[in-house]
Amino acid sequence: MTQPHFLKNIFTDGNFSADEQETILSKFTAAAFKKNDYLLFEGKVENFYWFVQEGYIRSFVVDIAGNDISTNFYTTGDVVIDWASFFLRSPTRENIQALTDCTCWQLDFENFQQLFHSIRSFREQGRTNLVNSYFSLKSKSIAMIADEAKDRYVNLLQHKPHILQNVSLKHIATYLGITDTSLSRIRKEISI
Amino acid sequence: MTQPHFLKNIFTDGNFSADEQETILSKFTAAAFKKNDYLLFEGKVENFYWFVQEGYIRSFVVDIAGNDISTNFYTTGDVVIDWASFFLRSPTRENIQALTDCTCWQLDFENFQQLFHSIRSFREQGRTNLVNSYFSLKSKSIAMIADEAKDRYVNLLQHKPHILQNVSLKHIATYLGITDTSLSRIRKEISI
DNA sequence: TATTTTTCTTGCCATATGCCAAGAAAAATA
DNA sequence: TATTTTTCTTGGCATATGGCAAGAAAAATA
C-alpha cells in the first residue's frame, strides 16, 4: 500500500479536484537539505516556493551592526518563502537555512505563475498563505510594541512549543527581539 | 476638458487595456470621510478595498492594557485595507480612522473577487500591493529589533516626512513603539 | 478675541534590557 | 572516551526608555 503524497495534505481533496491535484503535484519536485544548508542567500532572488515535509528551518537577516536576527522558523506543513523577493523578483535581504536535515517540496516561480493564473483554487490558497503570513507578522509586530519580552516568550511557548524544543536559545532570543542573556533570565524566572 | 479619473493613476494605461480599465473603474465607488470618521471598527469584517485620493488616515489597535497603538498611516495613492480581515473574512482587531477629511475610492469584496479572478493584471497588481505591504511591515519589524528608537524616527523622517507633518506626535510615537515623552526628547536631541 | 481643550515639553526617578566577561553545561567531534 | 566547540547561565554595571506629573504651547471652539 503506497503512502499518499505529502502534498495531498496541502492541496486537499476538499479544495482541489483530482485533475487539479495531479496538475499541481506534477509541478513540484522534492528537495532535500542537510543541516546548515542554505535554501536562500541574501542578495539572491528567491525562485522557489517550498513546503516543509520534515525538519526545521530558520530565516534571518544580518543588520548593519552585523548581528544575526532570526525572522522566522518553519517546520512540517509550513510554507517557506521570502514573499517579497519571490513575487517582486528582487534581491532578498534574508537568509534561509536548514536547522536540521530537511525534506521539502519546491515549486519554481514560472510554474507557480502558471498554476496561479490557471487554477482558481490555487490562487485562492496562495493568497490565503500570504495573508496568513502577513497576519502572523502583524501580530508579532504589535506584540513587540505592546508586550514585554517575558510575555512574548510565554506566548511563543504556548503557541509554538515545538520551536523552543528544536531551536537554540540565541536564535529564539533574536526572534523575540532580546539578547540571549535576557532570554536566559526570563526562562529562569518562569521556571521558578 | 475633463480631468482624468484618479484611479487611472492606479490602473495605468501601461498595465491595463482600455477595456480592463473601464471594467475595473466601473466597480469602484467614491467615498468621502470626515475627519475622525471610522472606516473600520475592530470586531467588524473588513468589506472594502480603498484607494486614497486625498487626506490622511490612520489604523490602530487597542492593546490589553487599553493603549492605542498606531499600526499605519495612509495618504494619496495608498491602499487602505486590513488584508487579513478582508481576505479571510474574519473580524478585525484594527480600527481605521480618518485624520483629516478624505476622499477615497472603494471596491467591495464581491467585486474584488470578480475582478481578481477574471483579469490577470488585476490579480498581479493586487498581489503586488499585498506583497509591498508585507515588505514594509517586515522592514518595520526588523527595525524594531535592530534599530534604536532614534534611528527609527530618523528613518521615518527621511522616508515619510509628510506623515510627520500631518500626524500628531503621540500617534507617531506609538507607531515607533515608544512613548510620546521619549519621542519628544528624541526630537529635541535631533534638532540641536 | 476669549476660553477651553488638546498637544507637546521637561524634570525626576524607576526599570527592563543591554553589554561584557567568566564559568558551567551540553553537544559535537576526534 | 577524551577533547574541542558551542550553548547556556550568571554577576556586575550601563543605558535607553517608561511612568508620572506639571507647565507651556498650540489648536479648537465659543
Image (cartoon, coloured by chain):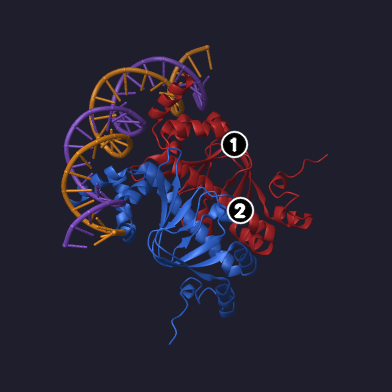
Chain colours: A red, B blue, C purple, D orange
- Residue A12, can we see it? yes
Front-most of residues A133 and A23: A133
In this rendering, is residue C24 above or below A27? above
Q: Nearer the viewer, mark 1 or mark 2?
A: 2
How far apart are labels 1 and 2 at the CA level? 37 Å
Q: What is the total number of numbered labels drawn onto the structure image? A: 2
Single out the residue that lies furthest toward the right. Answer: A1
Residue A43 appears at what percent x and percent y? 44, 53
Residue B58, picture quadrant: bottom left
Q: Residue at x 55, y 76 (%)?
A: B21
Label 1 and label 2 in one chain = no
Query: Please, which residue is most extreme toward the bottom here?
Result: B1
Q: Looking at the image, which is closer to me, C30 or A87?
A: A87
The amino acid type, in three-letter code, at marker 1 is Asp
Q: Is residue A44 visible?
A: no
Q: Position of residue D23 (x, y in %)?
A: 17, 43
- Depth check: give the residue in front, B130 or B39: B39
Q: Residue at x 43, y 87 (%)?
A: B1
Residue D11 in percent (x, y) is at 31, 17
Badge 2 amino acid:
Arg
- Residue C19, image quadrant: top left
Q: Which residue is mark 2?
A: B89
Image: A26 above or below B63: below
